[in-house]
Image: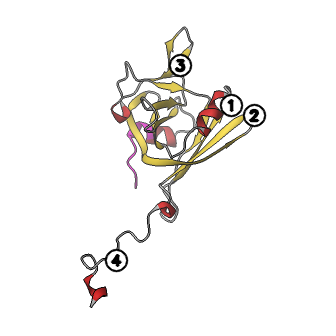
Amino acid sequence: MRRVSLNARTAFDAPTTAEIEIALIMIEHPDLDAPVRLSTDPSERLSVEPLMYGTRSTWMDSDPANEPFLFILASTDIPSDLEDAPAAASIIIENVDSDIAGLLRSFTDRPIVHMAVVLASSPDLIEVEFRGMVMTGSSGNAGEISIEISRAPIEEESVPMDRFTKDRFPGLFR
């Protein structure tokens, strides 16, 4: 059972509420100079020229003053907590810039994706968090791009893990 703050629990149980859930997304890759920080809510105006909105949070040791989470037109399906299925999520980004598809096609290995859900009134208090997931695929059309994230595929693990040598498996060499 996951822990949920009293404010979130009250908002979930209320017929209507002013609380807004925000998905914070952090994408890390060795080819990136700094992690990409994204938010699904334009909590505050970050700059006028260029016009940018975002959310300031200390999640993942981010500096709210210098490392805000930038607002994107996106929706997310957060991973479920089912025991029989791997945690999997999708991020659907509105295709407002043709450079997004080019960026997604430029990766040759899988980026690491972290996701958290917070309330707009308390962006530093994490309600749900999923760390260390990997981007498993992306698809899109002229209107939107869908990014699938999940745990690291077990199919990519090396098999057998250990080499069958005399030192490691002496019983095989009798």
Secondary structure of the magenta portion, mostly? Answer: loop
Mark 1–mark 2 Cα distance, whole angstroms, equals: 7 Å
> Which of the two discs, 2 and 3, labels the residue nearer the N terminus?
3
Q: Which residues are magenta?
A: 1-8
Is 4 placed above or below 40 here? below
Residue 53 is marked as: 3
Which type of secondary structure does the marked residue at label 3 adopt? strand
Looking at the rendered structure, the kind of residue marked 4 is Phe
Looking at the rendered structure, the kind of residue marked 1 is Asn
| Along the viewing direction, whichever of 167 and 104 lies nearer the viewer | 167
Q: Residue 157 is drawn in which quadrant? A: bottom left
Mark 3–mark 4 Cα distance, whole angstroms, equals: 56 Å
Which type of secondary structure does the marked residue at label 1 adopt? loop
> Mark 1 or mark 4: which is in front?
4
> Which of the two discs, 3 and 4, labels the residue nearer the N terminus?
3
Which residue is tagged 2? 142
Residue 95 is marked as: 1
Residue 82 spot, x, y in % from top left: 50, 60
Mark 3–mark 1 Cα distance, whole angstroms, equals: 17 Å
